[in-house]
Amino acid sequence: MGILDRLRNERQRRRSERNPIPDELWEWAVKEHRIFRGMGPENEVGLRKLSTAFLSLKRFDAVDGAAINDELKVSVAAQACLPLLGLDISWYRDFTTIFITPDSYTVTQSSTDEAGVVHEYEDEFAGEAFALGPVALSVPDIDASGWGDGYNTVIHEMAHKLDGLDGAFDGRPPLHEGMDGSLWKTTFTEAWEDLKAKLDSPGGGSRGRKLGTSKRRTSMDSYAAVSLDEFFAVACEYFWEKPAVLIREYPEVFDQLKLFFRRDPSAWRG
Ligand SMILES: [Zn+2]
């Protein structure tokens, strides 16, 4: 770690200590969200420290009159910091602002065709992580996250931030020493191809088995099929929210994420 990193960390630590999360609010946040159950006292202490740092470093901006209160901020901070338990707060260094919108919002996208004509169209987002920029999250999607059902917009958007830290949104964050980058790529690409193939097969998107066949269907969110980076973000949601699904569907992906996050949430709930 260089001198600048050390100074930065020291400054972050001092700032965090000045703005601790009140006990009552913290206890509420941990009890409210099922994904924190069984994590153990050591992880909980770590999560609180990370969340305190997160709240002192990040700015929440309300868009269109979205209601932001302390509960919402702590909910976002704690869920955003869960993936950092085995990492540290510097992994979120490339953004400061979190836009909070009252509803899933619509963004006007534009593209230019071969004739040079710009087409504009509207697209709906639950949240969005902009490259090297702010994160946007909607209140209903934050409220729907953390229940242990596999859906977590906060973790999803943070996963994109981790992924893009090396400048490429390719489903591969900067890996730790000793991790095998090509194994990561093969593992995720094969799983993503498999998911796409399952969704393309008859009845692919449904849960459970088709009568008369033992062919396994997928119970992963079909959004993961959109691209390799979305597959990574969705896999992170399952890893922290409902690890059993990821272990069943793509155990090798789970193992790679376990090496990267340096935690095993599947052991928490017994
Ligand atoms: Zn995404």
Image (cartoon, rainbow, N blue to C red):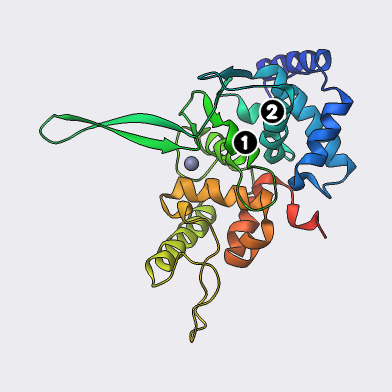
Q: Can the viewer see residue 231? A: yes
Q: Which quadrant of the figure contains the N terminus?
A: top right
Picture quadrant of residue 41: top right
Report whether 194 appears left or right of 88: left
Residue found at the far bottom of this picture: 212
Q: Secondary structure at mark 2?
A: helix
User: Which amino acid type is shown beneath numbered disc 1?
Assistant: Ile
Coordinates of residue 248 in the picture (x, y in percent):
63, 67
Q: Can the viewer see residue 87? A: no
Point out which mark residue 72 bears: 2
Which residue was labeled with disc 1? 142
Q: Secondary structure at mark 1?
A: helix
Report whether 218 appears left or right of 90: left
Picture quadrant of residue 32: top right
Disc nearer the start of the sequence (2/1): 2
Residue 232 drawn above or below residue 159: below
